[in-house]
Image: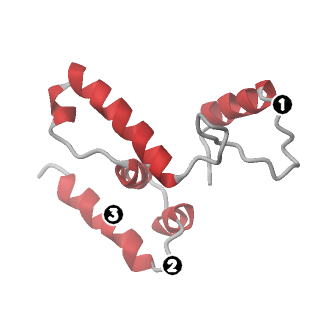
Amino acid sequence: MPLWTNTAAVLRAWLEECNVDLRSPAVVFVNLRGQPLTRWGVRYIVNKHARSASDACLTVAQKHIHPHVIRHTTAVHMLQAGADPSAIRDVLGHASAETTWRYTRVNLEQRPT
């Protein structure tokens, strides 16, 4: 999974702070009990922050925000930045190029006329 330079730097610093050996098969993201973070744990965290954000921004309260929204938004932003759809397919792990082309259609539908 590609990471932005700033994200990679923060992740490296955090791993160093936690004394995680990058050559080990250590679990990087854990929950409060020290167990591997599951997709449901990620969903809980995203929902918690979306609820918090909705207090300051009413439009957030009107949306159903979940981890897949972040994935979808990343794909659309990559497309808008000029990334090749096959590169987006690889990042998202799509088996079919058709799945990735849906983002192209969404992007075209969002453009002002």
Closest to the observer, 98 or 36: 36
Q: Quadrant of residue 105?
A: bottom left
Amino acid type of the residue tagged 3 in the rendering: Tyr
Q: Is residue 57 left or right of residue 93?
A: left
- What secondary structure is marked by label 2? loop
N-terminal of the pair, mark 3 or mark 1, is 1
Neighbours of disc 2 within 10 Å: few (<14), some (14-19), many (20+): few
Q: CA distance from mark 3 to mark 1?
A: 39 Å
Closest to the observer, 87 or 35: 35
Residue 92 vs 35, above or below: the answer is below
Q: Is residue 85 left or right of residue 49?
A: right
Image mark for residue 95: 2
- What secondary structure is marked by label 1? loop
Image mark for residue 7: none
Residue 110 in the image: state x and y as whole percent.
20, 53
Quarter the N terminus occupies: bottom right
Q: Which residue is mark 1?
A: 19
